[in-house]
Amino acid sequence: MTPYELAQVAVKALDARSAKEIRMLKTTDVTTLADYFVICSGTSERQINTLVDDVEEAFAKEGLLVKSVEGKQNSGWILMDFGDIIVNLFTKEMR
């Protein structure tokens, strides 16, 4: 799968769990960290944790495991690094 298609996997997983304000940003022209950033908001810490699990599962089905996860539960922000794709999940207040 291309990085674009992988980013779409994240968007679909987030949308399926009613994440808010989902944005997919192509970052190849501005950074070498990743090809795409996927950003969204959740309505609660509980939803953020569920979104993390769902995104991780969706990528695992495509054979891609998370390289690292930053942020802590109840911090209002979690970053998931899949190499070419970075997924940022925020509570509304933290975003």
Image (cartoon, rainbow, N blue to C red):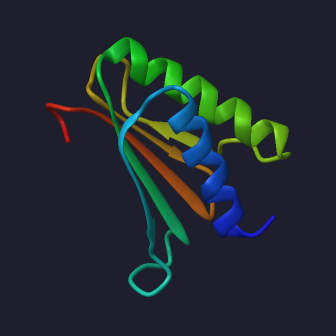
On the image, the x and y values in percent for residue 16 come to 57, 31
On screen, residue 86 above or below 28: above
* Quadrant location of the C terminus in the rendered image: top left
Residue at x 44%, y 87% (from the top left corner) = 29
- Residue 39 screen position, x and y as percent: 39, 50
Question: Disc count in the image?
Answer: 0
Can you tell which quarter of the image residue 61 is in? top right
Q: Is residue 19 left or right of residue 77?
A: right
Determine the residue positioned at 20% across, 32% down. Answer: 92
Residue 60 picture location, percent across and down? 78, 37
> Looking at the image, which is closer to me, 74 or 21?
21
Closest to the observer: 10 or 63? 10
Quadrant (top left, top right, bottom left, bottom right) of the N terminus: bottom right
At 37% from the left and 33% from the top, the residue drawn is: 71
Instruction: Give the residue at the far bottom of this rendering.
Output: 29
Q: Residue furthest top?
A: 46
**In this picture, is 88 found above or below 28?**
above
